[in-house]
Amino acid sequence: MEAVLFQVLAGLATGGIYASLALALVMIYQATHLVNFAQGEMAMFATYIAWSLINAGFGYWPAFFLTVLIAFVLGVLIERVVIRPVENAPVLAVVVVFIGLLVILNSVAGWIFTYTIKSFPSPFPAAIGIRYMSPHQMGALLVTLVVLALLYVFFRFTPLGLAMRAAAQNPASSRLVGIRVGWMLALGWGLAAAVGAVAGMMVAPIVYLDPNMMAGILLYAFAAALLGGIDSPGGAVVGGLVVGVLENLLGAFVIGNELKLVVALVLIVGVLLVRPSGFFGSVQVSRV
Amino acid sequence: MSRKTVTVTILLLIALACVLPFVLKSYHTFQATLVLVYAIALLGLNILTGYNGQISLGHGAFYAIGAYCAAILMDQAGLPYWATIPIAAAVCLLVGFLFGLPALRLEGLYLALATFALAVSMPPILKSHLLEKWTGGVQGIVIVKPDPPAFLGAAGIKLNADQWLYFFSLAVAIVLFIVGWNLISGRIGRALVAIRDHHTAAEAMGIHTALYKSLAFGVSAMYTGVAGALGAIAVQFVAPDSFNVFLSITFLVGIVVGGLASLPGALYGALFIQFVPNIADELSKAAPWAVFGVFLIGFVYLMPTGVAGAVRTLRRRLGSGKLFPLSKEEALP
Amino acid sequence: MSALLEVSGLHASYGATRVLHGMEFRLEERSITALLGANGAGKTTTLRALCGMVRTEGEVRFGGRRIDGWRTEDIVRLGIAHVPDGRGTFLHLTTEENLRLGAYTRKDRPAVAADLERVYGYFPRLKERARQQAGTLSGGEQQMLAVSRALMLRPKLMLLDEPSFGLAPLVVRELFSILRTINAESGVALMLVEQNAAMALDLAERAYVLETGRVVLAGSAGDIKSDDAVRRAYLGY
């Protein structure tokens, strides 16, 4: 019984990280109807920036917040420069651009920071650990919850958040009330990049920092986003936690740790075939 | 360009290809073999993604299946190398078709996502203890390089193993390209393109879209699987980490740069993905992928029809006598 | 006095197809104008052209300033509110969120709050449904919401594209009477595009009749209404 509890709580902690990345994916999907294949690499790159800052002498939390800011700016830039030209292009072109972005970020990270695995610090004091959760797991879960709460407040209660929601749902009407839709998109990318950076910094102490660290995590995040509903932020959160717990339970008791990633594959294919709108997403009816 | 010119060009190319192994060093012959292998793989991917519009980011998986088929059959069943090719083809045809069935329900982005997931999951599956008995787990399987067949020696033709493998792959490639060309330029090819360009209209015209799409998946997987088998024999080694998501992305780069929905595109793409990393490697370990990424994005913006498309446009302009067209009508490809 | 809106030589195209041919008209401040004509005459396109939503050539002057070629978001900031055909409601947001979006470009928070109350005063049913998802409102209520959202801009000019579309006659009557009140109380100029010529002519002071992208008739609403030949020829009744 204790073993199950360990796995469930550990699952919630990693699930929180999946939820953050899934939320970033959903934010971009809501605004653009596109899946950002490069989300994981953007998060990884941001984590390397944090590592560089810490190595240069910055304290953890100053480096953390500076990284979040830098990630935000980079996200905005990427949208304006790389994504904007292909916004209305055919799906294949967009997918190719995303993959190109993925590959460039991955290789530049490897170039600048080398492929040697590095360790990344965890800022959480031993005191916050409990019997079933390590200090870092506890801390990561708390950070995730704080980020989610902030995002919720931002989108629900601020005028800018409202404008971003409007621009994502109905760009034409948004222009009619004076919203600059293009900039809302860029902001969405910036926020998604910032959230991804947080996810990266939370996961790096666990899986160690290396350019390929996010590929598997991205897959879990995809599974989480699809499970919850690709256009539902709340769903992404629930999906993330469910995937995290499921991954741990199945990995520990059923299929063994090495095949854990297959859980993500099965979830992704399963959800897409059985219920593409996930649990909380809206069913898309496309006109023929 | 007249049919006669095309045929002559192709015959010249084949002649050139036959001469190559005698003027190149062994290692370069090996690289040339890989170009042929990749060309077959890219033709496979192009049938599915270029001509039929189904986006696959997971073709590395079919390459892996073909490769492991060849390796397992040679290593454990003692089959001769040439027998593994048709078996790998059949297995991948079936697997691809079976994959194509659920894929029918997935459109564009979602299919890309599902195949991406498949590609990322491939190495863990190949490494897993459950399959270790056959796959050799993390260490993989080593393959013995096949010798040239006895009858050649008897006829007095002396080839080393690399040269023989090259000719073997060349023969397979020529056959597959001819089959592919027949497929594409006939009714089936037109149906595939119709499905890509306007799914509903194709359906309304009586094209059995489900069947064609699944078949496209199957045939595409078959081509890439055969390439995988040949590749495994050439490299003499299969191991899980060679078949990760970056292999699938390499194939994507190949068809984007070479040219979507184009037969010669498969060859241009193969040349690109074989030799560019070699050159870029001089700069840094990471450089090849940075180059690939830049080319991916660059080609989407600047040359969406790939090298093949650029060649087509150039030929047309030269054919019309003007390199730089004067009027808009002349500029239309 | 220079007109609020002056249009001269306005052409508009969708792609390569020209739809409006050299339109000319003007609106005065605080006026109510009707733009009439059969289906396909170019009425909706005219409103879109004014808002920078289609490609145009020619001159459009708002308060003396040229706005042709401007982007929609910038034209809105000058005080032109467009109520599009189909209403353009943000279906997944609440009624009140829709209204607040109308005031997105405004900086004067207390005045916005006052305007919100005023709008609820015109349309009490919107206040009842303030926290409801806008997509669940009836057609008539969504039209009221669309008009109110436009009002929240505190516009100088409001463009309405077929406000009566799909609404029961009683509802239309109620809506139009409120429009008249709004015009009288806050001085917003109104430009209505309508297929329902009779009701539009009752509300408007001036009217322009379009046919295949050109203004073929201009005059006071009263004159046009009372001219039987004109009515039968251009307005079908």
Image: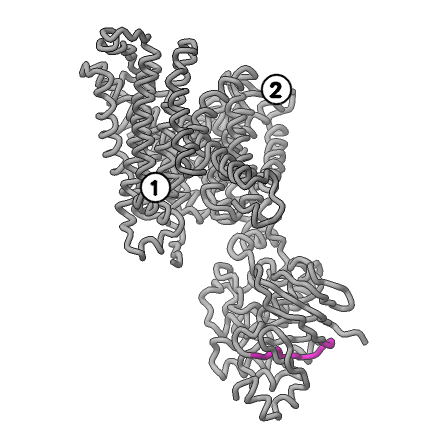
User: Residue A101 or A65: which is nearer the viewer?
Assistant: A101
For the residues labelled 2 and 1, say whether their Cβ atoms are less than 8 Å apart. Answer: no
Three-letter code, disc 2: Asn
For disc 1, the marked residue is: B185
- Magenta highlight on residue C30: yes
Residue at the extreme right: C1
Q: Residue C56 appears in which quarter of the rendering?
A: bottom right
User: Residue A106 or C43: which is nearer the viewer?
Assistant: C43
Q: CA distance from mark 2 to mark 1?
A: 60 Å
Considering only vertical position in the picture, is B17 above or below B310? above
Q: From the viewer's perspective, is C184 left or right of A109?
A: right
Q: Residue C206 appears in which quarter of the rendering?
A: bottom right
- Magenta highlight on residue B318: no
The nearer-to-camera label among 2 and 1 is 1
Q: Which mark is residue C56?
A: none
Q: Which mark is residue A55?
A: 2
Are there few (<14), some (14-19), or many (20+) residues within 10 Å of tag 1? few
Q: From the viewer's perspective, is C93 left or right of C76?
A: left
Q: Position of residue A285 (x, y in %)?
A: 38, 57
Chain of the residue displaying label 1: B
Q: Position of residue C85 (x, y in %)?
A: 54, 69
Q: Is residue B308 visible?
A: yes
Residues drawn in magenta: C27-37
Q: Is residue C113 visible?
A: no
Three-letter code, disc 1: Ser
